[in-house]
Image (cartoon, rainbow, N blue to C red):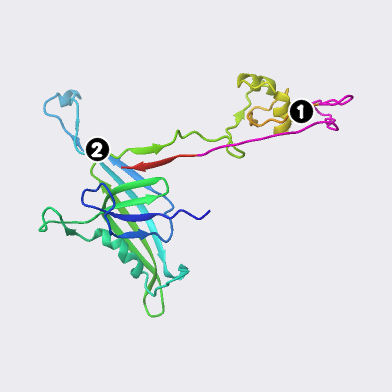
């Protein structure tokens, strides 16, 4: 499975959808972190006894949502169509800072809207600030590496939009584990969670003494094996090793993961 790359898309002037034929930039390296900041404009009320500490109810003006991230570009890491100056790559990002005439009034200028899209994360806004650091110069003085710090903003409080129910699938390595408490036995833990096959759960989790669980011991109660003994066979838990000469084992797991989130 290929690595999902982040993109910057130019929006139309309605800030609602991507502009047909607009600028599209695929980042070279995905950002390590995304910082989303929410802020409200607080308006001081008229009246109220401030001397008594009662300034009345404050009012909120237009809210703002900001996204801060850092992008890296390196021409020495390009596998094809390599260029000699990293600014040939970053000029496509600088484009989103460049004012353009408005469709409603050509005399007014404003930077284009931009959509940052990475996997399930989506943010629409305008580039409020940009800082580029050039480093690792060639012998003829051309910068080969650049880091760009971008700040995007939207003049409203954006809420995340999720898809799917968001439930974590039960599959190996992802099933939630139960922690044993003081005095717990595996049989009591299984009973509290509607499980009756505590012997199979003990076998599947490699628990030698299910009657005396150590506090904090983690158990996957969804993992179990069928345990059966033939004539003359026996199964015991404790210091003695179990006789598994006629034990049958069978386990199956399945999942169907789904989910996404966006701002807009």
The quadrant the C terminus occupies is top left
Can you tell which mark lies on residue 261?
none
Using residue 220 as the reference point, say whether residue 28 is left or right of it.
left
**Residue 216 at x, y percent in the picture:** 63, 29
**Residue 69 at x, y percent in the picture:** 36, 52
The front one of 219 and 54 is 219
The front one of 198 and 35 is 198
Q: Quadrant of residue 224?
A: top right
Using residue 171 as the reference point, say whether residue 10 is left or right of it.
left
Using residue 92 as the reference point, say whether residue 169 is left or right of it.
right
**Within-10-Å neighbours for mark 1: few <14, some 14–19, many 20+:** some
Q: Residue furthest front?
A: 20
Above or below, 111 against 82 in this view is above
Q: Residue at x 35, y 60 (%)?
A: 25
Asked if the stretch drawn in magenta spans residue 247, the answer is yes
Q: Residue at x 64, y 19 (%)?
A: 191
Give the Cα distance between marks 2 and 1.
61 Å
Q: Which residue is mark 1?
A: 227
Q: Quadrant of residue 28?
A: bottom left
Q: Which residue is mark 2?
A: 40
Chain part drawn in magenta: 229-257
**Residue 103 at x, y percent in the picture:** 15, 55
The front one of 60 and 105 is 105
Above or below, 251 against 106 in this view is above
Q: What type of secondary structure mainly makes up the magenta span? A: loop
**Residue 248 at x, y percent in the picture:** 78, 32
Label 1 element class: loop
Q: Residue at x 62, y 24 (%)?
A: 181
Q: Quadrant of residue 213?
A: top right
């Amino acid at each position: 499975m290929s690595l999902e790359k982040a993109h910057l898309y130019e929006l139309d002037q309605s800030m609602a959808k991507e502009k047909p034929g607009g600028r599209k930039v695929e980042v070279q390296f995905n950002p390590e972190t995304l910082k989303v900041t929410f802020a409200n404009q607080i308006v001081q009320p008229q009246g109220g006894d401030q001397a008594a500490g009662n300034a009345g109810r404050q009012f909120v003006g237009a809210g703002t949502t900001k996204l801060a991230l850092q992008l890296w570009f390196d021409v020495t890491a390009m596998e094809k169509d390599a260029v000699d100056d990293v600014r040939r790559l970053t000029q496509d990002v600088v484009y989103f800072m460049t004012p353009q005439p408005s469709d409603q009034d050509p005399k007014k200028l404003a930077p284009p809207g931009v959509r940052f899209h990475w996997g399930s994360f989506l943010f629409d806004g305008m580039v409020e600030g940009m800082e580029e650091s050039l480093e690792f110069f060639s012998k003829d003085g051309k910068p080969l590496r650049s880091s760009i710090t971008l700040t995007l903003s939207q003049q409203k409080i954006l809420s995340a939009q999720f898809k799917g129910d968001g439930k974590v699938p039960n599959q190996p390595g992802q099933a939630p584990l139960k922690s044993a408490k003081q005095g717990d036995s595996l049989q009591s833990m299984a009973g509290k969670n509607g499980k009756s096959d505590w012997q199979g759960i003990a076998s599947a989790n490699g628990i030698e003494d299910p009657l005396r669980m150590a506090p904090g011991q983690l158990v996957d109660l969804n993992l179990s094996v069928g345990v059966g003994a033939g004539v003359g066979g026996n199964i015991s838990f404790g210091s003695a090793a179990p006789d598994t000469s006629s034990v049958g084992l069978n386990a199956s797991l399945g999942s169907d993961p789904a989910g996404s989130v966006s701002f807009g």
